[in-house]
Image (cartoon, rainbow, N blue to C red):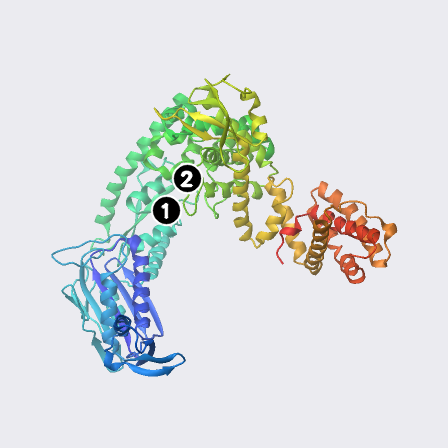
Amino acid sequence: MPDLLIELFSEEIPARMQARAADDLKKLVTDGLVEAGLTYAGAAAFATPRRLTLAIDGLTGESRAVREERKGPKVGAPDAAIDGFLRGAGISREALEIRDDKKGQTYFAVIEKPGRKAAEIIAEVLDATVRNFPWPKSMRWGTGSLKWVRPLHSIICLLSDEAGAEIVPLTIDGITAGRTTYGHRFLAPAAITVNGFDDYEAKLKRAHVILRAEERAETIWNDATQQAFARGLELVDDRGLLAEVAGLVEWPVVLLGRIDDAFLGLPPEVLQTSMKEHQKFFSVRNPKTGRIECFVTVANMETADKGATILAGNQKVLAARLSDAKFFWENDLRTVKAEGLEGMGAGLANVTFHNKLGSQADRIARIAALAREIAPHVGADPDLAEQAAKVAKADLQSEMVGEFPELQGLMGRYYAAAAGLDEAVAAACQDHYSPLGPSDAVPTAPVSVAVALADKIDTLTGFWAIDEKPTGSKDPFALRRAALGVIRLVLENNVSLQLSEIIATSFLNLIWPLLQDGRMRFMGKIWDDPEHELIPRHFFGGGYGPVEGDFIGWDRFDEACGAGKCLCLEDQTTENSPSWRPVARGVVLKDLISFFHDRLKVYLRDQGIRHDIIDACIAMPGNDDLTLLVKRARALAATLATDDGENLIQGFKRANNILTQAEAKDGVEYSFGADPKFAEDNAEKALFAALDAADANILPAMKAEDFSTAMTAMAALRGPIDAFFTAVQVNDDRQVIRRNRLNLLSRIRKTCLSVADLTKIDG
């Protein structure tokens, strides 16, 4: 069975595209070969800056012959139907067979496809792959029609076995496949003739080309760490940069240079970011001081002077870059010392956050007020939380963050320290953006937690108020990420917080300033909204003067929201076209809490807690305290994982179904009056006693938020309930006994539902 070697040799492929392109080449070719009837034992794809390579082992020499029968129309069918069948089968009318079928004589087509040589199939598949390759960006060159990421120069397409190697006949846009490639552009530019993959890889390495990206990365890392260690330094780990640099060179040569002393006073993150973003340099740190003192650059060239000229040129360019960074840093420090951090952020009043939510300064004022409200819940000092929120985004106006946006927050911490602010305030400047994703660290310092929660809740409340919620896969304002951030901040810090109260405060913080400064005019327009259909009921003009009906002013805002009505405000931010939009706190609150619950389900599902268990806990009162909600869900999950818990669900559902059917049939509610004096069977008496014992344990446990104890007490009912249903017929002919037993079932339902809504549990 032959092996296949394909190489597509071109000008430099961007590093960010190489890994994906190698995977695409492998998938497109192997899928095409299999679809055409060939099989293979294994395949591997490789990429360097100038080539994509695919090696396939154990390829079959030819495809198998295929015989296919297709049933066609009946004999005597219209000619159009028969002709269509012939076209689809690719045969003539004379080749049709007539066979007896259940419904009469029918045409059949027998299609025989002989086996094809592997070379013929490979040529077709590779031609289609090259012409339809899914590059993110591609180009044409010369007079040809072929599109590739960069001009394509040559193609290797070689089938090899024990007998030797055979070139697959193939020409694509004037490029004829062969067995010739080229080594390093400068160190070994001569043509290389190859006879198979092993020969190909070995000859490339002799020609100063390392084919495998992981080998190039390992070479870079090992050489860089050794050179740093020799000077008593350590390389700063950056796997993303390592992968990128490995895609920039075919023969990596590591060079270690020193940063000029004039720049060592810059924050290490500034040095690291500047070198990484502009020069693709690795940072080298002094482990004793934590300062970035040196850099590593990776050349694609060996030189007679051991890279001295290359290093000198890089140091010159780096000095110019770092001079800019030093200028930004010193200017920002002068601003902070002269005007303070709030002075640095004064310009945020002229930066629009959203045209319906005001400027960044408006948002900062809301976050500060909300952080003060949240602070006691997380153990933070309210004054520090408010102060931190007021300056947390000031660095957005700094020159350094203007040059390096990825340093926002971090530079805020440096500037806060330079301004002499409390360490907790400085930490909050950096940490309030976190967590940014599911793997990002969660702040634990109380002031940082308060500001981070306020930041994210203000964002969510604001966009909910203007009806800019995520839809489907679209989430342009990253609101799902913000909600997950709130969930992680609350749960991982074990914060007990009534989320509905915080959202309500955030909503009022949003609306009140807009009313005060005239950007939004409260018209007192009320809508009945029982089924989310807006029907006008009363109209008031001029803001606070009623035209007809009862006056609804700001003092009755909460009352109207609580009554389920949706107050509307007239948006004055849009010239010539003021728009009505519903902003009722009650509507925003209900929908946003539901959104948090949906994100919580995703978060807990990844931790192995079933959605129905979460639903059973969400249905209980106090579901806006996420910490208690999760404690309840975990306790319920642990209970249902036991035999008693699993079987209790069956007993509960049986009791609930019998009771529900009886109440529907009788038109009454059996919710009280179960009396043990009417109990006849020992199992019935035992169930009364068990329910009394369970209630005695469950009620204080639930009050103390000890869900594990409550769940254990509930699970203990499994045995008495099973025994009751085994020994007793609920729907007894005697009405007094029947009513008593139905009321007993009601006690089962009430006791179990006091812990969690077990009707939501599947199965």
> In the figure, residue 134 lies in which quadrant?
bottom left
Q: Quadrant of the C terminus?
A: bottom right
Q: Residues within 10 Å of mark 2 (few under 14, many from 20)?
A: some
Q: Residues within 10 Å of mark 1 (few under 14, many from 20)?
A: many
Q: Position of residue 273 (x, y in %)?
A: 35, 42
Q: Which residue is mark 1?
A: 284
Q: Amino acid at mark 1?
A: Val
Of tags 2 and 1, the one toward the viewer is 2
Instruction: Give the answer, above or below, for where 218 lies relative to 108.
Output: above
Q: Position of residue 392 (x, y in %)?
A: 45, 31
Q: Amino acid at mark 2?
A: Phe
> In the figure, residue 490 lies in which quadrant?
top right
| 360 or 109, nearer to the observer | 109
Q: Quadrant of the N terminus?
A: bottom left
| 741 or 331, nearer to the observer | 741
Instruction: Give the answer, above or below, for where 653 lies relative to 284.
Output: below
Instruction: Give the answer, above or below, for where 88 lies relative to 526.
Output: below
- 742 relative position to 502: left or right: right
Is residue 419 visible to us here? no
Q: Position of residue 48 (x, y in %)?
A: 27, 59
Is residue 103 visible to us here? yes
| 398 or 128, nearer to the observer | 128
Q: Which disc is residue 683 wearing?
A: none
- 29 relative position to 503: left or right: left
Direction right: furthest residue = 677
Q: Which residue is mark 2?
A: 477
Sequence-wise first label, 2 or 1? 1
